Amino acid sequence: MSIERHPELIEAAAKLMQQECIIEPLDALRRAAKRLGIKPVNLPKCDAVRTALSARLLLFDPHLSKRIADMRYAALEAMVFLTEFQPRAVGGVVAGNAPKGSPIQIECRAEHPDQVQKRLEELSIPAQQRQLLKPDWHKTWFEFKAGDFNFELHPLTLQERGCKANLSAGADKLRELIRVSG
């Protein structure tokens, strides 16, 4: 059977995203493929996993709309403190399919992650710096808790690019999403 017509793989990936708070659909697809004994070649589109995740959340999370609205308000408040870095909310908080317990993700533009770290220190926000080091790639981000929510703050350097436009929102778009869903 072709992996592209593998609904079990798509559903397993959506379930992993929901239950284990996996942020990236591609990561969930790879893990699901491994658990199902499927070689991770020609994986289904990430949009199929996002759609399946949205359906699961609607079924299993009766307070989804309120929780997403609360997350969007919290993202907007955090973005105010980071204005100098042109912050953008990304991922599940924008798409409206953030699983319970998943962090609010914010991307910001900075020439170097140290600039963002300095700003967090100025604001007395106790953030943990995280790094992913690969031979040809280095990624730094910051994790912190504010109120009831966990945040991930991802500084984007000039070489990095952000999420697709429909999974990213500046302050104005986030306000519009809050207005429409509220």
Image (cartoon, grey):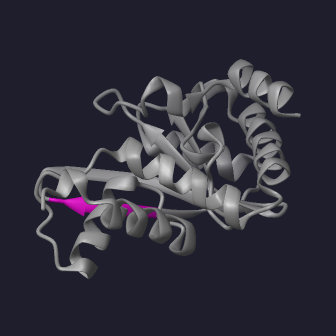
Q: Nearer the viewer, residue 67 or 155?
A: 67
Tell me: 148 left or right of 172.
right
Q: Residue furthest right?
A: 182
Tell me: 153 left or right of 68.
left
- Compared to residue 25, the image places residue 126 above or below, namely below
Residue 126 at least partly seen: no
- Compared to residue 163, the image places residue 11 above or below, namely below
Which quadrant: the C terminus?
Answer: top right
Which quadrant: the N terminus?
Answer: bottom left
How far across and down, in percent of the image, does residue 103 sit? 62, 58
Q: Nearer the viewer, residue 22 or 124?
A: 22
How far across and down, in percent of the image, does residue 47 sit? 40, 42
Magenta residues (range): 130-134
How far across and down, in percent of the image, does residue 84 sit? 64, 25
Residue at image position (37%, 33%) is: 157
Residue 170 at least partly seen: yes
Q: Main secondary structure of the magenta part?
A: strand
How far across and down, in percent of the image, does residue 170 sit? 64, 24
Total labels: the figure holds 0
Tell me: 2 left or right of 131.
left
Give residue 39's quadrant in the image.
bottom left
Residue at image position (77%, 32%) is: 80
Tell me: 55 left or right of 35.
right
Residue at image position (18%, 60%) is: 134
131 within the magenta span: yes
170 within the magenta span: no
Q: Nearer the viewer, residue 85 or 12?
A: 12
